[in-house]
Image (cartoon, coloured by chain):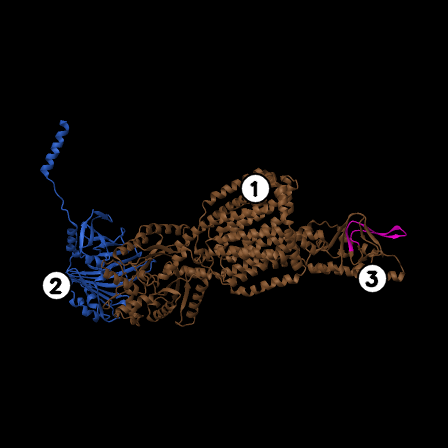
Amino acid sequence: MKQVLCPLLALVCLLFTTGFRKAPYLSGDAIISKMKDIHATESEVELIKMVIVDEDGNTSIRQLISVIKPDSNGNLRYLIRFLSPQDIQGVSLLTLDQTKGASEQYLYLPALGQPRKITGDQKSGYFMGSDFTFEDLRKEAAAEHEYHRLMDDAVEGRDVYAIMSAPAGVDVQNATGYANRILYIDKETFDILKIEFYEEGNTEPIKIFRGFDYNSPEIDGTSKRPQRAVMNNHINKTTSMMIVLKSRLNVDIDESLFDPEQLKSWEPGSDQPVLSLFEKTQK
Amino acid sequence: MRSLFKFCYNQAYAVLGLFLLLTALAIWKTTQLEVSVSSDKLIPKDSPLRAEYEAVKKKFGSDQIALIYAEDDALFEYERLKKLKALSVELNKLAQVQRTESLFNVNNISGSAGWVDTSPLLRSIPKSPKKLAKKQQQAIDNPLMLRNIISPDGNATLLTLYLDKPDDADPLFDRELYNAVETLLQNYRDDFGQLYQVGSPALHVWMAEYVLNDQKLLLPIAGFVLVLLIGFMMRSVQGCLIPILNAFISSAWTLGFMSLMGIPFNMLNSIVPALILIIGATEDVHILTEFKEAKAQGKNNFDSIQYIAHHIGLTLFLTGLTTVLGFAATGLNAITIMQEFGWTAAFGMLARFIVSVSFLPAYLRFFGNFIGKKSEISSTQQAKPIRSPLGDRVCQFLMDNFVERPYSAIILFSLIALPCLFIINKISVSNDLIGFLKEDSPVVKKLDNVAEKLSGSKVINITLKGDPGDFKLAKKLKQLESVTQWLRQDLRTDTVISLADHLSLVNQTMFGGDIKDRRIPDKDALVAQYLIFFHRSDLKPYVTGDYSTANIAIRCNINDSNQLNQFVQEVKDTLNSGAFGLLSYSVTGKSVMVAASVEKIITGQIISLSSMIGLLFIIVAILFLSARAAFLAVLSNLFPVVVVFGIMGFMGISLNVGTCMVAAITIGIAVDDTLHLMVRYNKDLKALKNEHKAIHSSVRAELFPVITTSLGLAGGFIVLSFSSFVPVLQFGLLSAVVIFLALLADLILTPVLFSTIRLITLWDVMGFHLRQALLEKSPMFADMTKWQAKKLILLGNLQEYDTNTTVIHEGDMGDSMYVVVDGEMEVSKQVNGQKVVFTQLGVGQVFGEVALVSRIKRTADVIATQPTKTLVLDWESLGKLQRSSPYLSSKLFLNLSKILGMRLKDANQKIESKTTAPFPPRRDTQTR
């Protein structure tokens, strides 16, 4: 008995002398907040190739520029404009986030001549024939969602936080196309590696987003986005990819780009000022 | 046949053991038999439309759909819609489902202030009743949804499941999907006023259930009819058991054969067991009747079996052959379901024949004693109706009114048949799976309800073709829009949707929602920019990825293949006319292929009927050695077919996969009685030497069996009218009519036609022993082959005389000449009370020829000195010979004229030499 008690007592004493070190536990909100902080920029300009593959393997390729910049209140503004193919060149989507989580959207079709304002319901609509919806393309809107941390997981051999995101209120719920999402965030880099999208009543994800090659050397410049963002649509059995070709962060961007009234002033060649941003060396 | 009967009787243990083994194997194989009903079976495998259909299916997705119909007075309530969405999600997960269309995923192109929303109407379900009412109205107002997804009153909706069904799909595909859907629906039925599935899988499963239910109904009724028939004919319980046992074995073999060959049980070949039972019974009745007769004559079982083989062996073979060929002829059709029926039924009839001629002799070795026990009573009872005064009166009536006055019969039958010939072209042709079902069946009612509230389940794709990018051009899209609108105005279509509708709706929305702006924009660039509102999967059913081909998807409820073909033809004519500009197009769809197969039904009908007629002609021509007899047999059996076609035309009964089998099958069966009659006539003619007497005798003898077997068969076919399937029902009733008409033809027309000719059979000629000396010596058979000589003798009046029989009496008036075929005769004369023999007549010699030329008194006696056969020729028999066999009679006349010429020459010489001998020397003939 003595032989057993002595080592046990020694072990207890050792534990008390060294003390318990409690690992910091991050909540879902905290992880999202940290992720947003890490990925925060003053502005982003990206040249993106969008590839849409249907279930028969037919591929359509579009090229677009994405410009993101917060306004003076910190609300993000997004401009997406197609560069090719030629028949949709100049088609632009301008999204202006509002303070209370709502957003205004404007669409400009050059052939129509006038920009059209988009109603709030459009968030859930597919973006320009791809498998990304309007809301998929926005930065994570933390104010509109509640986050619950699930058991940690691993994606592609990397440890990740698994966070379940659900609409924070009825308005958001009515506007969104998803009942909830599960975000898989790299524990080390806080990059989003995977998102599963769920519809109401469906236990299987309807879409899965995967982000590959963050900080890829293949991107001309630095980016907060994955070099390849792949969205698999399990309902339509289609796939859409967004490949970042060029990226510049924290560059000066002309405010008029985010003016809805200026959308109609687009004409072939008027994207040159934006494109010239890629000629600048990343700060 | 006799050898086979003998072998099976002697080796009874081995035969019964073999049958037991084969039947057990067949039953084991039958357990693997599948029941399958599919519209694919109504399409020829080599259909030229198939390649185009497959190409369109590959480009635009499946047109094979299952529909879930949900109806409720308060459909647009939050909880109900939530349940419906949950159901939709669960249905979409089924492995067999390629995609679904519902309120929850079909584009609801709407917008305000110029913005377009192409997201589904109910991506999320609002809770507010006001918003729900608005959504309901939006759905009704949307041409992409109205009648496609939602009923005009907004209370019924369809969940459309587009199925991922490969061509080589598992036969259980439909059943598995149906069951999976039913399992899901069970959980939701209480939430809706009506909730059920329709569409091709459900239809196929329901019809398969009908097939099995038919078996439960048809077989017992057929068995009951059989027992009645046999009970009436044989009055023997034992006799009832054998045909049922025979039918059981044959049916087991047939089902085993189907399983082995991968032929599924379907709505047509499912009637084969009933047919085996009914048709097979008539053959068994013939066999058992003969067996009883033999037993009544005191024969033992073995001799009785031999007696059957001798008496009806050949007839059994012939009738078995024609029946098998009749069924096989229906398989000469490009339509798969008919091929399967033809081969199955032909195998079934063959199996039944094999069982009859091999199992039965073995069986009767052990159980034959039970059948013959009351033979005397039975035979007496059996004989009664044959000798009944009623039968005599009927027979006499037929003879007096028809055979004796053949023109009255021919005019009567012509008056019936000729108008029918003119009505035949009014027969419509139909090929439609739904058309198989009765109008009051629950399945049709469900389909009609869905079609009435929403749209039919028939899918037609009109595909317009161009170069890559063409259907991004406003000009081409305007053409597409015009065609779409034209089709939509056609009342026969329920829904018509194309890419033009999607773009028009976007245009309308972008310009403020005014209906006048629901049109294709004028600028190509605007079209291209409108297209970015759509996900590729939204447009997949309507345009190819390279925009070279556009598809107009039509849903309709045209269940009459003629109407469908007419619709398709009108579409083609209009598109060809250039009314919408120059267009390269195709019209496809499974229903289009099925409807287009009506041509194959007509072709199949012509092939099977002409094959059967050809085979009948060849069989009769060979067996009775006469093209004329073959022609008359065909004519007699065509009468009921022509009349039944007339009835179909008159009553509006369409030619379908069921009714197009009637002609070939019933000819194959009805000809049995004709053959029975012809064989009997041949026998009686040989015995009675007079056509009318032979006809009377043979009609009298066959009257009872022909009437009873015909009524039995007609009754058996009427059993099929209890089937759930219209073509089977029509097949049964029309076949019964044909059998009844064939009975009339066999009792009236056939005797009239055959009374004009002499019949000999192949086996008569083969069995006739002709001495070679006859051919060598007789001038009458000069330049004839042995076969021709035999045929000539048998067709002529062959008389047999015993020894010392006087063939010619001196002083009698005569008009016939004679040829000694066998035996010997002497020519003598009584001179002063003493018999003076002038000469002996041997084989081949001719005598009495002068009487043929000029009716004169015989100048001497001719007496047979040994059993003798002579061919007796007079002008009447020569005339009949000329009609029966013109070629042979021409040779005969040539030889006859030579003989008469020689006689004239001899007479002249006699006059010159003043010879008074009554018979000139016959050096000329004997030296030949």
Label 2 marks which chain's residue? A
Residue A233 visible at all: no
- The spot of residue B194 in percent (x, y) is 33, 55
Chain letter for the brown part: B
Q: At 39% from the left edge and 50% from the top edge, which residue is drawn? A: B175
Magenta highlight range:
B818-845
Which is nearer the eye, A240 or B422? B422
Residue B58 lies in quadrant: bottom left
What is the chain identity of the residue bearing mark 1? B
Give yes or no for contact between labels 2 and 3 (Cβ–Cβ under 8 Å). Answer: no
* Residue situated in front as seen by the camera: A42 or B299: B299
Disc 3: host chain: B
**Which label sits on residue B591?**
none
Which residue in the protein does label 3 denote? B904
Compared to B183, does A76 lie above or below? below
Which amino acid, by three-letter code, is at mark 3? Leu
Q: Is residue B169 visible?
A: yes
Task: Tell me residue B690's x, y (percent).
Answer: 71, 55
- Reply above or below: B237 against B428: above
Answer with mark 3 or mark 1, whichever residue precedes in sequence.
Answer: 1
* Residue for badge 2: A72
Residue A187 image offset from top left, x and y in percent? 18, 49
